[in-house]
Every structure is written in C-alpha cells, then in structure tokens.
Image (cartoon, rainbow, N blue to C red):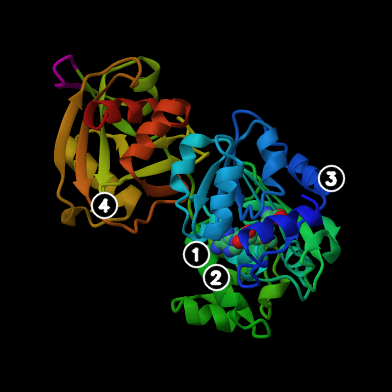
Amino acid sequence: MTQSEIRSALAELGREPSRSLGQNFLHDQNLCRAIVRQIAPGPGECVVEIGPGLGALTEPLAETGAEVLALEKDRVLAERLQRVFTGRIEVVPGDALEFDLRPLWPRQPVKILGNLPYYVSSQLIFHFCSELSPARRALFLVQREMAERLCAAPGSAEYGLPTVLLGRRWRMTRGRLLPAGVFHPAPKVESALIDFELRGPGELPVCDASVFERAARAGFSQRRKQLRKLLAGEFPALDWTAVRAAAGISDTARAEELALEQWIALANALAPVGAAQDVHGEMFDVVDADDRVIDRRSRGEVHANNLWHRAIHLLLTNRAGEIFLQKRSLAKDQNPGAWGSSAAGHVDAGEDYEAAARREIREELGLDAGLVSLREAVRLPPTAGNGWEFVRVFRAEAEGPFRCPPSEVEIGAFFPLPVVREWLRRRPQDFTPAFQECWQAVLG
Ligand code: SAM
C-alpha cells in the first residue's frame, strides 16, 4: 500500500492510526514483498500474520498460495480485512495474545509473520514461540533495540533474560534495519527484522526446561548480583560448589556472563535429566494367544522374534474434556519425536497391567498414582502394527501440571478432542501407530 492508499483507507473508515494499538503501517510495497519472500511461504503451508492492519504484508502473503490466518485486534480493521480479502484469507478478530495455538498443530507446516505493535511485541514473541506453537520459523519486525537484545552476545549490556529463554529453542538472527520513514505514521525509533528458526534436534543438550527457566529468571532478576546468591534464594538446597564445578562456571559468575550452553549446563547440574531410560536390561513376560504368561525374555529378544508381550496406554483427560498428549523425546529408540498417549509403556516381567499403568503415571507424569482413579477402557489384540503387544487402554482424569521426564518427553500438553481428531486426519504421521490404534478404539 502507498502512503496515499493508507490515508484514504483510514479516511474511509473515519480513523486515525491508533497509538495505543501500535499502528505504524508499512507503505513500501517492494519492502513488503521482500519481507514476505524472506520466510518463503508456499502452498500447503499455514502462515499466521500477527496484526495485519490494512493488509500491507497480507496482500503479498495471500499471493503465495499459503493458507493465511490474520489476527487483528482492531475490530474496524479486522472487518475491513474480511471485506477486502473475502475468501482469500481467514481473519481472526481479537487479541493475538489470547489466540489458542493448539488448533495450529493440524495445519503444519506453520510459520509466523508480524510487523508487531511495539507496546506488546515481547509478549507476542513469547506467546507465538512457546512450546505450544507448532511453528518452526517466524519473522518479526520489531524495534531495533529489541532485535539487538534478542541476538546479543553474553557479556554485553543487551544480553538478558529474553535472549536466554528464547535462545534455548530458537536460533535468532537480526535482519535488515528499517528507517522510521517506511512507516505511516513514522515511529520515533528505527526498526529491524528478526528471523527465528527452531533449533534442530541435538543442536543443544537436553535439559529440564522449567529448571532452566527458574535459574535464568533468578539469575537475571538482579544483574549486578552474583549468581551464587541469587540461585541460593531460588533453590534452597543448592550445593553451589558442586553445581558450579559441574557446570564449569566461575565462583563469582553473574548471569550476563553465561553463554546459552552454560545456562543449560547449569540447569543440568541443578537437576540432571539423566540418560534416556536404559531399555536394554528390561525383561518382559512373553504370553500366549490367550494372554497367559509362558516365558520371560529380554526386551531385545521379544522385539527381534515378534514374541507376544504386554503394554498399557493411558488416555488422560482434564475437566474441560481435553486429552493430555506427550511428544516423545528425540532420544527414544522407537518413534522419536512422535506424539503419543498421555503415558504408555511395556508391562514388566511379573507385573500386571494395572500396576504397570500406575508405574507409568508416576514415572511419566510425576503424579501420585494412588490418587488417580483408573478405568480400563478397552483391550487390543497383538498385531504387527502395535509390535505384537496385548494392549490395555486405561482412562483417568487429572488436571496437571505434570512433571514429564525431559529425557523421555519433549513436550506434554492438553489438546481439545476435535483438534486431535482433525490432526490425526490430516497428519497421522505425527503420531505413534500405537496411539492411533488406542484413539480409534476409545475416542475415534
Ligand atoms: N501489518 C501492518 C503493516 O505492516 O502495515 C500493521 C502493523 S502495525 C505495526 C500493528 C498491528 O497490530 C495493527 O494493525 C494493530 O491494530 C494490531 N494489533 C495491536 N495489538 C494487537 C494485538 N494484541 N493482537 C492483534 N493485533 C494487534
């Protein structure tokens, strides 16, 4: 849109740009096209645009053939977008901070784009780059100062909590600088693009995300103070000498001196995630066609020889009727990175199905299994698809939060059932085959 098109669109609506909504509209079409090209959207992809305004970025975005979801808080502008882009994009009126990210999982691949309203840009970035977001790429236009803070190196004055918290999952690169003159009205400060790319598996060591965040928040709460004192407040049982030696940091270190890898080492020294479960030593009962125990063999032998054995799956829902799903760690030997049941596992030798379900509730969800009331929902026969397991599926209700072991589970979250149904329909490859069978039998 040109400056005069922006002026006349606003005049038609009887509006001035709203300062409180951070409305600074882009008026250079070539620049808008270049920004859209930078995240390379295409058919089959879904791009969520935050704050589309008068549609300066939305127009070139819609031309790429990607599915566009435009989230606009200004009701008048949202209605105008609905009229101008009828049938070409989906407009979602309302506050993007309240946008539920979970229905985006069936719509992957997802990218996020936004010339962000500056008053709320940091909150928007944290929301759309949270673990509940399926996006693997995002491009934001923000104040230059903010872009520089996010990409700052340790030891600099700009390096801070957002750099560290977002940096654990995202690689952030500052892009081109934009002078105030490319916006209408011109803001008082320069702007910059910042490109987010989700880190690949194994790029950084795994750690307990909640311990990492607690440590970083405590550490940056008073930049001038030494970490030793700040962490002692947050982790009362802290053995600082042992922790700092394990993490390889100095006795007098301050938060701003620690590189991302050192924050991760610190989190791991505070709460080691342990190795992924040692599956090799496990022993299972081997059963006959009537599910009677006939032998006891190692996990390796059971799987190599297609021997019938036993497993449990738990489908756990909350009061809102949403189901808790786990995304398996990339370190798992089977179905790494796939989404599966709320908890699942083999029945150990000498164990019965219900005891195995209670053990998995303890180990995979961190719940006191005695407080959870279990119902058996269905029994599934062994098939090649489920790895020759007799499966009993249990159901239970609980609200969370759960403590899933970081070595086993990358993310865990409640999802509305219609979202899971749609997700399974569009992207069955995202789920373990065993979960698909359980879902079909119980909730499908
Ligand atoms: N994308 C347009 C452009 O580049 O010309 C407009 C960008 S302008 C900087 C920010 C836009 O975000 C405005 O349209 C404003 O109304 C909208 N906005 C402000 N707060 C919002 C929020 N919380 N959720 C969604 N949109 C918001």
Residue 320's disc number: 4
Q: Residue 303 location, x and y as percent?
A: 37, 21
Tell me the element at label 2: helix
Tell me the element at label 1: helix
Distance from the alpha carbon under mark 2 to that under mark 4? 32 Å
Distance from the alpha carbon under mark 1 to that under mark 3? 45 Å
Distance from the alpha carbon under mark 3 to that under mark 4? 47 Å
User: Which residue in the structure is indicated by mark 1?
Assistant: 211
**Residue under the image location 48 percent in, 77 percent down:** 234
Up the image or down, 266 lies above or below 220; here it is above
Instruction: Say which amino acid is labelled 1.
Output: Val
Instruction: Say which amino acid is labelled 3.
Output: Asn
Q: Is residue 148 magenta?
A: no
CB under 8 Å between discs 1 and 2: yes
* Majority secondary structure of magenta residues: loop
In terms of image quadrants, where is residue 10? Answer: bottom right
The stretch of residues the image draws in magenta is: 288-294
Specify whether 260 is left or right of 206: right
Q: Does residue 321 appear in the picture of this structure?
A: yes
User: Which residue in the structure is indicated by mark 2?
Assistant: 215
User: Which residue in the structure is indicated by mark 3?
Assistant: 30
